[in-house]
Image (cartoon, rainbow, N blue to C red):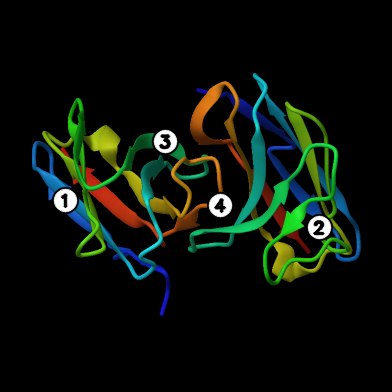
Amino acid sequence: SAVISQKPSRDICQRGTSLTIQCQVDSQVTMMFWYRQQPGQSLTLIATANQGSEATYESGFVIDKFPISRPNLTFSTLTVSNMSPEDSSIYLCSAGGGTADTQYFGPGTRLTVL
Amino acid sequence: QKEVEQDPGPLSVPEGAIVSLNCTYSNSAFQYFMWYRQYSRKGPELLMYTYSSGNKEDGRFTAQVDKSSKYISLFIRDSQPSDSATYLCAMSESSTGFQKLVFGTGTRLLVSP
């Protein structure tokens, strides 16, 4: 298995600002992902964080809004840029492969944009 | 039409009941199936994963996959109040769980003492 931590666990931000969320895995993993879970809804994949190269974004998500970094096999960041109230959501990091036998999730970051 | 359909519930049962949670899907390329449990204000916790049709058992939990009907189920025996949570099914076109997952909307389960 893999144990995943995220920082911050929650934040309240002002419109127009940016927030960077950190994801740390306790072992080396092949794949890392970022999902969004809007209130009362299920999880939607934002992007795959690729180690050493640009992230792969899903339809409807763009790099300028959600820049992602993955400098090594255990760490990734997601930035939510130029935030609006519509960005209020839970952002979840997941990881799998390598020493992890399947895909595991972090505890999430609860973001509220005023 | 969503790729994965799941009844949002809530599903209310008394303690000790057998619970059946289900998902249907439309994408015949899905071949890896997972169930996560999510408590309020927590991240999804992996319960079970399976590749191929058939049954897989782990303690009080049994996962069942019927690819011919595009239908998966999770059974919980002897349900406990601590099982009260939202249960999410997830699927992947990959033969492993390391790739993109498509989730159902989740079924909220309430087990009363």
Viewer-side residue, B105 vs B83: B105
Residue A66 image label: 2
Q: CA distance from mark 2 to mark 4?
A: 18 Å
The residues tagged by marks 3 and 4 sit, at their Cα atoms, a distance apart of 15 Å
Where is residue A112 drawn, in percent x and y? 71, 57
- Identify the image quadrant of the C terminus of chain B: top left
Q: Using the numbered discs, state the Cα–Cα distance from disc 1 to disc 2 in whole angstroms.
A: 38 Å
Please state which amino acid type lies under the numbered disc 3. Answer: Leu
Q: Nearer the viewer, mark 3 or mark 4?
A: 4
Q: What distance separates the C-alpha of mark 4 from that of mark 1? A: 26 Å
Q: Secondary structure at mark 2?
A: loop
Which residue is label 4 attached to?
B100
Q: Position of residue B23 (x, y in %)?
A: 28, 60
Mark 3 or mark 1, which has the lower sequence index?
1
Query: In the rendered image, which quarter is residue A100 located in?
Result: top right
Crowd band around label 2 with a 10 angstrom C-alpha radius: few (<14), some (14–19), many (20+): many
Per the image, the residue denoted by label 1 is B20
For the residues marked 3 and 2, what is the alpha-carbon distance in whole angstroms? 26 Å
The earlier-in-sequence mark between 3 and 4 is 3
- Discs 3 and 4 share one subunit: yes
Q: Are marks 3 and 2 on the same chain?
A: no
Q: Chain of mark 3?
A: B
Q: Nearer the viewer, residue B7 or B89?
A: B89
Q: Residue at x 23, y 36 (%)?
A: B81
Q: Closer to the observer: label 2 or label 4?
A: 4
In the image, which disc is placed on residue B46? 3
Left or right, B48 with reference to B72? right
SS type, badge 1: strand
* Residue B48: numbered disc: none
Q: Is residue A51 above or below residue A29?
A: below
